[in-house]
Image (spheres, helix red, strand yellow):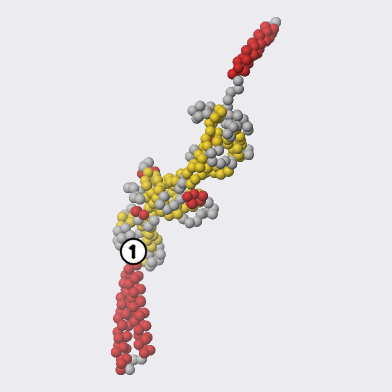
Amino acid sequence: MFIRPLILVTVLLTGGLLNACDSETPASRRHGKTDHLVELAPAEIQAVRTQLTSSNSLQARRIARISNEIGARVTKLSVNPGDAVKQGEVLLQLDDSLIQVALEKARAQTLQAQSDFDRLNKLKPKQLASDEEIARARTALLMARAEEKLQRTRLQRATLKAPFDGIVTERLVEAGDVLPANTHALTLIDPDSLYLKISVAGQWIPWLAVGDHVSVRIPALGDNRFDASITRIYPAIDAATRKGSLEVELLPQPYGVRAGQLAIAEFYTQSADRLVIPANSLHHDSQGAFVYTVDHDNKAHKTRIETGQQYGDMIAVTDGLTAQSRVVVKGSIGLREGKSVKVVEPAAANP
């Protein structure tokens, strides 16, 4: 006996809703069909450029790995990593006592050879010395002089000096060590020759040039940006990564900059003319990219396109559109092929 009142209430409510819908239908018909509003933008040829960002550690262009050419014991080593040195300053001294002895011997042999050669030359006018004897004496003299020069050079090479003004960055041996020949003992860099080697996609290499401005940020030095420029573009592209390499130099170098610090380079490619449209007009479906265009009769068309690089809020179009094609940037929801639209100014468009 409780079910019948509930059914009655449901029927009454349903009937009321239907009556309400019927009462609104004439009003809707009186208003007519609502226009489909769209906002358009033309496809345009613009000079565009791409911002590139790359990072790496700063490194010194002038670097010297100080090595000994002769095997000997280290008798003096007074420099440490971080020390500033001047060109010609002694960095490392090797034991040269045996070389000194060899040089004295070579000098004595040179004197003896010179004496023998002079004596035979004096005897030649008297025909007491043959040409063959004089030739042998001349050869002996030349060999003695060469040996003396060799020992003098070895003596000089026992003292390792700084090839340029710089900073010691590595000390790999200690005083008293016996070094075999060609041992890497010290590393010296020129702190004023720092540069940044970075990689960029190979497609951008043709749009860059030596001298292009670069903005460099070194996180260790704060948020400041420093002026730099491209000083070298490598001619080959890495076949594995498809990237090219650039060298960037800071001019002048900021205070506090050090080799090994992370540096972030930001720069632009050179300008190039491209057919572009607003990126927000682009749509995708299972068949690829498309936009809605509007013809001169204000009818919409679904137009397939091929796109290229994006430049900020614009994207390049490589196929499918021509300059001045009218592209829908707002109001694309509900559009279909051939649908009539009303073009409005940007402030009035309602997507």
Q: Residue 37: image x %, image y %? A: 55, 27
Q: Quadrant of the N terminus?
A: top right
Give the total number of marks visible in the rendering. 1
Q: Is residue 347 left or right of residue 10?
A: left
Q: Residue furthest front?
A: 296
Q: Nearer the viewer, residue 15 or 148?
A: 15
* Residue at left offset 53%, top offset 27%: 350
Q: Which one is in front, 25 or 80?
A: 25
Q: Secondary structure at mark 1?
A: strand
**Is 349 drawn above or below residue 241 in the view shown?**
above
Q: Residue tagged by mark 1? A: 160
Q: Is residue 135 left or right of residue 314?
A: left
Question: What is the three-letter code of the residue carrying label 1?
Answer: Leu
Give how far across and how far down residue 111 sits, in percent.
Answer: 30, 81
- Quadrant in which residue 286 is drawn: top right
Residue 337 appearing in the image? yes
Split into 4 quadrants, where in the image is the C terminus? Answer: top right
Asked whether residue 80 appears in the rendered view, the answer is: no
Placement of 173 over or under 124, stated as above or below? above
When the figure is inspected, residue 151 is found, relative to residue 167, above or below; the finding is: below
Q: Nearer the viewer, residue 33 or 175?
A: 33
- The percent coordinates of residue 61 (x first, y second) are 39, 56
Quadrant of residue 297 within the rendered picture: top right
Q: Residue at x 33, y 78 (%)?
A: 145
**x and y percent of residue 335 in the render?**
60, 30
Q: Which residue is more in the foreground, 136 or 108?
A: 136
Label 1: few (<14), some or many (≥20) within 10 Å? many
**Residue drawn 46% across and 46% down?**
271
Residue drawn at point x = 34 percent, y = 82 percent: 141
